[in-house]
Amino acid sequence: MSKTATLEIDGKKYEFPLIVGTENEVAIDIKTLRTATGGVTTIDPGYKNTGSCESAITFLNGEEGILRYRGYSIEELAEKADFLEVAFLLIFGELPTKEELEKFHADIKAQSVVDDDIKKILDAFPKTAHPMGVLSSLTSALTAFNPSSVNVDSEEDMYKSVVKILGKFPVLVAWTMRKKQGLPLDYGDNSLGYVENILKMMFKKPNEEYTQNPILVNALDKLLILHADHEQNCSTSTVRIVGSAHTGLFASISSGISALWGPLHGGANQAVLEMLSGIEADGGDTKKYMAKAKDKSDAFRLMGFGHRVYKNFDPRAKIIKVAADEVLGDLGVEDPILDIAKGLEKEALEDKYFVDRKLYPNVDFYSGIIYRAMGIPTDMFTVMFALGRLPGWIAQWREMRLRKEPIGRPRQVYIGENSRTFKDIKNR
């Protein structure tokens, strides 16, 4: 017998079915609420208690620090898989065979050339433009050079769209950074792996050979995997709701980039480095700033510690801390900003105030450290986040379209003026 929830309004009772997920998450199905009650709706600012969809992609349990893609733990995927395998898993539901992965990569490489006219759009941006604004615009501009809409009922059409955006997006990321640095643009090297090619496109100097550093390749591969999806966060929900209007894949992903740009979402790792720079400018006294962070009357906020979803620890942070230590050890970077970061990390992991409140360094803290050490500019950090999140956005858009979900249309509770009579301007 199916379970129901009972809602009583003005003495009248209404029953609504309960939906139970495969991990025993329980939700009240209220899609008939307004019809059944004659107009009653719910209000939930920020949708903290409202499920917008049923999804088979990512499971997240913040209380226990669990993150799984399609049932596979993030720990196992980060250890045993590479980014393209994880991308295939998220988008198509299963880990690829050797043959499927080779074809996937070959098809992505075949679609990696961006129309040269896109460079004209890039040229129109000043060097001072924020890279996230540039990336969002360039991604949206791809629709002009690929105007045909995707037939979502055709697996072939859907697959072509997927490999096309996976092929072109890293080029746009690299161009965005190189434009800011005044470096020439190119289309990469198809003889390389996906992540290796990203690094070469970003960092190759025109007057010298580029040598791959396996520690940096491994660190970036892990960072991209750890950022690949994170359930119904702000940018992912944006991609789904924009896509629900049957908006194309490129335009939907462009909207996700804009949502990710916000400092409360993808901009968090940039905020970490800006905080560290501020501490350095003030003399670099980490103990002073740890004390400020504990003082509730102080406006200072310690960025990169704790997480609004993970109430215990961020499982991604445990993984990437190892990579951060390897990168810093290998590169031997002498950087006061990174020294301050290591000092804050050490104190937070030993300070009773932070330990008791489980305010551990999160993935944004360590990703910022790694990107800084690699030589990626601070305002490019969120762009790198977008690069990792791309497969998740694709997977969520694809799932939403294949499930034929209705167009997103939230309700509201009106709190404005009641009906008023218009006054002529001379009488106002």
Image (cartoon, grey):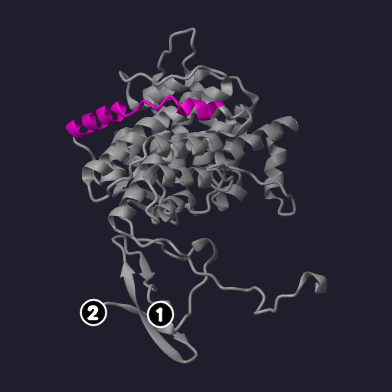
Determine if residue 86 is in view. no
Using the rendered view, name the quadrant where residue 241 is placed.
bottom left
In this picture, residue 32 sits left or right of residue 284: left
In this picture, residue 273 sits left or right of residue 425: left
Asked if 242 appears above or below 281 in the picture, the reply is below
Amino acid type shown at disc 1: Thr
Tell me the distance, in whole angstroms, between the alpha carbons under discs 1 and 2.
24 Å
Asked if 371 appears above or below 289 in the picture, the reply is above
Asked if 160 appears above or below 220 in the picture, the reply is below
Mark 1 secondary-structure assignment: helix
Q: Is residue 105 magenta?
A: yes
| Residues rendered magenta in the picture | 98-123
Q: Position of residue 368 (x, y in %)?
A: 54, 34
At a point 43% along the width and 23% down the height, the residue shown is 199
Asked if 324 appears above or below 310 in the picture, the reply is above
Number of residues whose C-alpha sits closer than 10 Å to that of mark 1, classed few (under 14), some (14–19) or many (20 or more):
few
Using the rendered view, name the quadrant where residue 244 is placed.
bottom left
At a point 19% along the width and 35% down the height, the residue shown is 97
The N terminus: image quadrant: bottom left
Q: Nearer the viewer, residue 183 or 356?
A: 183
Mark 2 secondary-structure assignment: loop
State the residue position of label 1.
35
Q: Is residue 21 magenta?
A: no
State the residue position of label 2.
1
Specify the principal SS of the magenta part. helix
Q: Position of residue 121 (x, y in %)?
A: 52, 30
Most extreme residue toward the bottom is 11
In this picture, residue 128 sits left or right of residue 204: right
At a point 57% along the width and 19% down the height, the residue shown is 182
Amino acid type shown at disc 2: Met
